[in-house]
Amino acid sequence: MNSMPVPLQQVTLHPDLEPIYEVVLRRNPAEPEFHDAVRGVLGSLGPVIERRPEYLDAKLVERICEPERQIIFRVPWTDDSGQVQVNRGYRVEFNGALGPFKGGLRFHPSVSSSIIKFLGFEQIFKNALTGLPLGGGKGGSDFDPKGRSEAEVMRFCQSFMSELHRHIGEYTDVPAGDSGVGEREIGFLFGQYRRITNRYESAVLTGKGLTWGGARVRKEATGYGCAYFAQEMLGAKGSSLSGRTVTVSGAGNVAIYAIEKVQQLGGTVIGCSDSMGYLHDPAGLDLALIKEIKEVGRGPLQEYAARRPGSRFVAGEPLWELPTEVALPCATQNELNHDDAAKLVENGVLIVAEGANLPCTPGAVEVLRQGGVAFGPGKAANAGGVATSALEMQQNASRDSWSFEYTEDRLVQIMRDIHQSCHEMAFECGVPGDYVTGANNAAFIRVADAMLAMGVT
Ligand code: NDP
Ligand code: 2IT
């Protein structure tokens, strides 16, 4: 790199948007992740604000930055030793202009108002990009499932749903999984919802098991969708994943199925990671072994290196030091910083597509932009999960069950359409190839037009 990049925080906002952002900072103190998410979107909206001044007159940006409703509640439960534990539960119903609030639940000790609001805010635009009738929301708890027995996880989920059930419903708000919440937790949550309400309301939650209302491909959808989006990004450069070296961070739901699809599309995934460090397997990852360790055993990734000759586990260091042509951050927010991005650029990375929500810091995004690396933001690249949740809701509404092939074809088409709208909007905004500007403007226009049509609500 020739010059020091300008951190995104210092990029000037459109003059009409700066005072709106100032109010967001004042109204939501000490919420840095939420501030970054808002600034990330507002930083792109110059072109649309210039063309559509009626959005400013109707105070649409201010309205979109303020959640419609935020619920914070106590979640008391009893652990296996008989001790009472207390956690905090959240559901932020951010924007319902395009459909019922929709977004996952995250169980992780780092969960706070800031984290849930940033995720909910991003979800509005991601859901809009799918073109499906979905509003945006998010929820979760600071409960840490690690090291908890299945009985403890069940009691926690039952207590969580004892409050949440009042606020959700097929036509109101439809939660799903996110980090720390998979099919097992959705099962406990759905069981408690059914018991309290005495209703078999399948479409109140998505990510269900296949025998009780779940959809084929939902488990795989976020990771598969991210790989398909990366394939489209490479296609726009006249290239593809076939024969490419790829690194995928994380070893959870999104990462595992991103790795699976990249491998099916002919790429070689040489590294992945978990919260303890990263794994390097130059021969290409043995995905069956990763599934056995992480999905079945819920154990540490480190076990892999002990069982697979030629691989090594590097504790406490970022995966991004490995040279790669394609990087898919699929673990968590802010996991790829300015220095990591500089290393990727130095090593000749071609594209970065976010499987996680805001895994690249604002500084990292700027380094990638200045380094000429194509960057697919999460709200576009990881939208396959929520899109397939919408397909699950469609199947529930018609009491139908689609085949794997049919559902995956729908997912592929949705990811292509999202790529195309971002690509076309970037071109229209005068910044061809800038997927961030493309995604934010395309999504904002969809939400803003719906809100305009509905009056001041
Ligand atoms: P999981 O809980 O299944 O997996 C998260 C993985 O990331 C785990 O392997 C975890 O390690 C690892 N991890 C956590 N922190 C770090 C870190 N700092 N460095 C490296 N690895 C880390 O979550 P998901 O796969 O469901 O979600 C991952 C991301 O994708 C999140 O940002 C989520 O919001 C986003 N997402 C998820 C969707 C979904 O459908 N599930 C849809 C769209 C986006 P360990 O095992 O040690 O805890
Ligand atoms: O971040 C996300 O898009 C998700 N966790 C999936 C949300 C959903 O409702 O399927």
Image: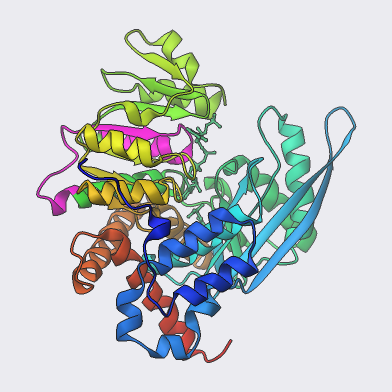
Determine the residue positioned at 18% across, 69% down: 427
Residue at the farthest left position: 238
Determine the residue positioned at 58% across, 66% down: 25
Q: Quadrant of the C terminus?
A: bottom right
Q: Is residue 16 above or below residue 271?
A: below
In the image: residue 111, left or right of residue 407: right
In the image: residue 214, left or right of residue 327: right
Residue 260 forms part of the magenta stretch: yes
Of the pair 285 and 1, the residue shown nearer to us: 1
Is residue 330 shown to the viewer in this render? Answer: yes
In the image: residue 282, left or right of residue 357: left
Residue 285 forms part of the magenta stretch: no
Where is residue 166 shown, x and y percent of the image? 75, 66
The span picked out in magenta is 234-263
Where is residue 30 shown, x and y percent of the image? 64, 56
- Location of residue 80 (image quadrant): top right
Determine the residue positioned at 38% across, 70% down: 443
Of the pair 262 and 111, the residue shown nearer to us: 111
Q: Quadrant of the N terminus?
A: top left
Where is residue 81 shown, x and y percent of the image? 87, 27
Where is residue 41 shown, x and y percent of the image? 42, 65
In the image: residue 346, left or right of residue 414: left
